[in-house]
């Protein structure tokens, strides 16, 4: 499981970066900042203090960067770093924090364009789950019978259909279900196929060890495979 997640999170992170550039950056208009430098505008953040903290964090990453494309913009373009260049230098954690700190208008503009308006109140929690799992996968942590510290927000119809309780969303099924939800928005169908193959392999593993697999602790109900398949 860890290997699958690590392999596919690079695509996921790049997709988030690209969509942010394509939506928020290209729709930004100001007489003070160029579109490529919209992140410098404190008005795009939930408040000025969060904005200043975010920019300080970005500046620290840039100052410690050894990448040629960063030093080029420092020296040749007087330190003006376009957003799409900056994104290449940020960690997944910095990226998700940046998204969280965007004001409601900017955030919803991006969510509506990529994930549809209906998912406004869910997306940030889904991305935080992805960030958490990516860190777990990087350390080859245990996923089986794990009590995950993240609890995603999910639509009521999903909670009802798959027997998910609001006070019991820390199990493996809910975490994988959340990943399935966000991966389903990927435009690349190859990613969908890879995910479904992963679920088929998981199904085979569970079938081979069904006498030992703890369905209850892991939150797996009878229709678990339906819920995890795109």
Image (cartoon, rainbow, N blue to C red):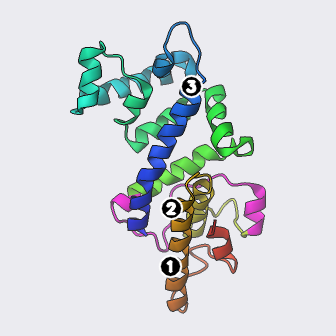
Q: Residues within 10 Å of mark 3 (few under 14, many from 20)?
A: few
Q: Which mark is residue 26?
A: 3
* Disc 3 to disc 2: CB gap under 8 Å: no
* Element at label 1: helix
Q: CA distance from mark 2 to mark 1?
A: 22 Å
Q: Indicate whether 5 appears above or below 72.
A: below
**Observer-nearest of 57 and 147:** 57
* Element at label 2: loop
- Mark 3 vs mark 2: give the one in front: 3
Q: Indicate whether 162 appears above or below 50.
A: below
Give coordinates of residue 106: x percent, y percent: 61, 27
Which portion, as a residue range, is magenta?
Answer: 136-161
Query: Toward which corner of the image does residue 26 lie, by quadrant?
Result: top right
Q: Indicate whether 78 appears above or below 53.
A: above
Give coordinates of residue 155: x percent, y percent: 73, 54
Please say whether residue 170 is visible from this viewpoint: no
* Disc 1 to disc 3: CB gap under 8 Å: no
At 53% from the left and 55% from the top, the residue drawn is 150
For disc 1, the marked residue is: 201
At 65% from the left and 29% from the top, the residue drawn is 104
**Quadrant of the drawing holding the N terminus:** bottom left
Q: CA distance from mark 1 to mark 3?
A: 41 Å
Q: Is residue 217 left or right of residue 118?
A: left
Query: Toward which corner of the image does residue 59 lie, by quadrant?
Result: top left
For disc 2, the marked residue is: 148
Q: Is residue 150 magenta?
A: yes
Q: Is residue 225 magenta?
A: no
- Mark 2 vs mark 1: give the one in front: 1
* Element at label 3: loop
């Amino acid at each position: 499981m860890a290997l699958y997640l690590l392999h596919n999170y690079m695509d996921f992170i790049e997709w988030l970066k690209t969509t942010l550039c394509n939506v928020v950056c290209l729709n930004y208009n100001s007489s003070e900042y160029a579109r490529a430098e919209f992140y410098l505008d404190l008005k795009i953040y939930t408040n000025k203090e969060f904005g200043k903290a975010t920019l300080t964090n970005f500046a620290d990453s840039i100052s410690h960067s050894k990448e040629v494309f960063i030093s080029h913009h420092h020296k040749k373009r007087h330190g003006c770093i376009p957003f799409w260049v900056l994104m290449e230098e940020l960690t997944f954690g910095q990226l998700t924090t940046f998204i969280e700190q965007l004001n409601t208008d900017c955030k919803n503009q991006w969510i509506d364009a990529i994930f549809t308006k209906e998912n406004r109140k869910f997306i940030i929690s889904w991305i935080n789950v992805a960030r958490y799992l990516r860190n777990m996968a990087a350390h080859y942590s245990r996923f089986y019978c794990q009590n995950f510290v993240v609890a995603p927000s999910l639509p009521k119809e999903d909670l009802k259909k798959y027997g998910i309780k609001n006070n019991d969303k820390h199990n493996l099924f809910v975490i994988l279900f959340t990943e399935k939800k966000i991966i389903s928005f990927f435009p690349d169908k190859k990613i969908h196929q890879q995910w479904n193959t992963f679920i088929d392999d998981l199904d085979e593993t569970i079938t081979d060890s069904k006498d030992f697999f703890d369905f209850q602790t892991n939150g797996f109900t009878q229709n678990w495979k339906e819920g995890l398949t795109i």
